[in-house]
Amino acid sequence: MSLAPLRRIAFRLPAAAARFKREGGGGRAASSSVVANCDRSECPLKSEALSAERFLFSCPSCRRLIDHPEMSSFTCFAVFGIGRDFDVDTKALKKEMKTLQTALHPDKFAMLDDVEQTSLAESWSSLVNDSYNRLLRPLERAQYLLELQGQPLAEGEIQIEPGFLAEVMEVNEEVAEAESPADLSGISEANKAVLKSYVAKVSKAFREGRIRDAKVLVARMKYFNTIQDKIVEKETAFGMVG
C-alpha cells in the first residue's frame, strides 16, 4: 500500500501503511530509497519496509521515533523535504524549523520514561538544527551545495586578483574607521547590495549547472560576507542592534 510523497513529518500523517520514494538531486525523486523499520512489537507496520522522500522521523502508524540505520545519508535538503537547489524559501524553512523543533523536542519524550526514544529525539533535534544552519544563509548553503557536487571550496583554491583584494581591503578599512552609526549604516547598505548581487549570480550559476563559476563566485562572496559579519559586530558595539 502506498501514500502520496511525504511532505510533512510522520507525526502528522494518518495511521496507515506507507512507502515513499527518497528525495534526489534537483528536487527529483531517486530510483532507490533508504529503508527503515518500526521496532515497536505492537505496531501494525512492524514487518513493513518504510522508506522516505525526506527524513522519516517516526513511524506513520504508531508515531514512535525510528532509529534509521542509514539516516545520515540524507542531505540537509531532504531533512526539510525540499529540493536540492540554491534558491530556498527561507520563510518557509524557518516555519518548518519551528514545527520540527516542537515535534522533536526531547522533553516530550522524556515524559514517556523511554530512554531510547529520548536519545533519538536528541539526535534528530541536533540533525535538524545542523541542517537548518547549513541552509539558512546563502553562503553556507552554496558551500554545502558545492560539497554535494563533489567540489568543495578549499582554502586558497581560487586565485583572487589583486584588484579585488584591494577593494575588499578598502571596505574593511572603512568599517574599522567608522566613528558613528550613520557612517556604518551607509557602508552596511552598500555591502548588502554587493552581497545581494553575488547571491543572484551564484543562483544563476547553479541553475545553469556552471559549478566552476559558482565556486569562483562563492570564493569572492566569502570576503563580503566576512565584512558584513564585522559590520554587525560594530553595529552591536554602537548599540544599533540588540
Image: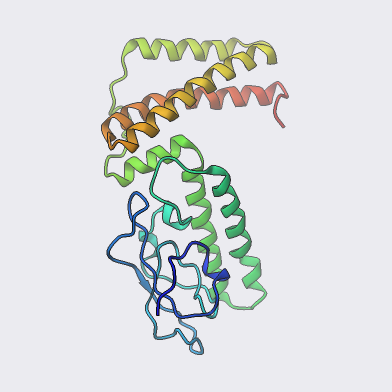
Give the residue displayed 35% in from the left and 10% down from the top. 163
Q: Relative to 177, does residue 7 appear above or below in the rendering?
A: below
Give the residue displayed 40% in from the left and 10% down from the top. 166
Q: Relative to 144, does residue 107 appear above or below in the rendering?
A: below
Toward the viewer: 120 or 95? Answer: 95
Where residue 34 appears, x then y in whole percent?
34, 68
Where residue 70 appears, x then y in whole percent?
36, 66
Where residue 5 appears, x then y in whole percent?
43, 65
**Drawn side of residue 233 relative to residue 166, left or right:** right
Where residue 22 appears, x then y in whole percent?
36, 63
As drawn, the residue found furthest toward the bottom would be 42
**Drawn side of residue 180 relative to residue 124, left or right:** right
Give the residue displayed 40% in from the left and 38% down from the top. 142
- Quadrant of residue 178 in the image? top right
**Drawn side of residue 175 relative to residue 111, left or right:** left
Toward the viewer: 109 or 32? Answer: 32
Toward the viewer: 57 or 123? Answer: 57
| Image label count | 0
